[in-house]
Structures are given as C-alpha cells and as structure tokens.
Amino acid sequence: MRLDKYLKIARIIKRRTVAKDVCEGEKVMVNGRIAKPSADVKPGDIITLDLKNHIFEVKVLAVPPNVRAEEAHTLYEVLRDQKKGEEL
C-alpha cells in the first residue's frame, strides 16, 4: 500500500493530501530512508515522522485496504512519541 494512503487509513494523519505533502517535504522515513508518498508500506516497516516539534515513530502491524476508525490504532505499534528537545 502507498505510504500516503497508509498514513490516512491508520489515522496517523487525517487527510491523504496532507500525508502526501508531509512526505514530499521529506519529513517521513520508512526503515531509515526518506520516503516518497508512493513508497510501498508492508507489515514490519518502521515509519518515522519528523513534524515541527514532534517525532513520531511506529511499526506497521497490518496493511488492510479499509479499516473502521475505532480499529485504526491496531494497524501500528508506537515505538517513539516525543517532543523535540526531550531526552529519550
């Protein structure tokens, strides 16, 4: 599944166009490499989002074509969720 679509389906980013813009701004990495919106995402991948004042890192657990909003959090495991400037 495309990275921008996964970010939207998993409700990590609310809109696909926003997810696409974040990816094009080189703020998203998959497995340690900067990823384009069309990058393929599969279970086991590590996605890191470097947002303004926040770093969010998740491990992909599942990549279904559709999911209900209540179940979106089951698609990934949060590995890191920190504000920039904080110690690990």
Image: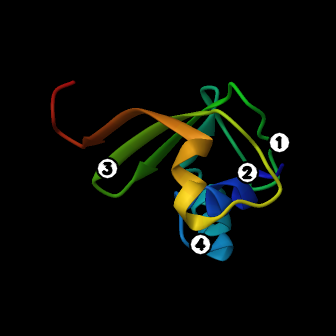
Q: Amino acid at mark 3?
A: His
As drawn, the label of residue 18 is: 4
As drawn, the label of residue 3 is: 2
**Distance from the alpha carbon under mark 2 to that under mark 3:** 19 Å
Locate residue 61 relative to residue 37 in the image: left or right: left
Q: Say which residue appears at 27% left-offset and 40% top-offset.
A: 82
* Count of marks placed on residues: 4
**Distance from the alpha carbon under mark 1 to that under mark 3:** 24 Å
**Distance from the alpha carbon under mark 4 to that under mark 2:** 12 Å
Residue 16 in the image: state x and y as whole percent.
Answer: 67, 71
How many residues crowd around disc 3 within 10 Å: few (fewer than 14), some, or many (20 or more)? Answer: some
As drawn, the label of residue 16 is: none
Residue 57 in the image: state x and y as whole percent.
Answer: 46, 36
Vertical side of 80 occupied by 20: above or below? below
Q: Amino acid at mark 4?
A: Val
What color scheme is it? rainbow
How many residues crowd around disc 4 within 10 Å: few (fewer than 14), some, or many (20 or more)? Answer: some
Among the two numbered marks 4 and 2 on one chain, the one whose residue lies closer to the N terminus? 2
**Contact flag, marks 1 and 2 (Cβ < 8 Å):** yes
- Describe the element under mark 2 as helix, strand or loop: helix
Q: Say which residue appears at 62% left-offset and 43% top-offset.
A: 75
Q: Which residue is under mark 1? A: 40
Quadrant for residue 87, please give it.
Answer: top left
As drawn, the label of residue 54 is: 3
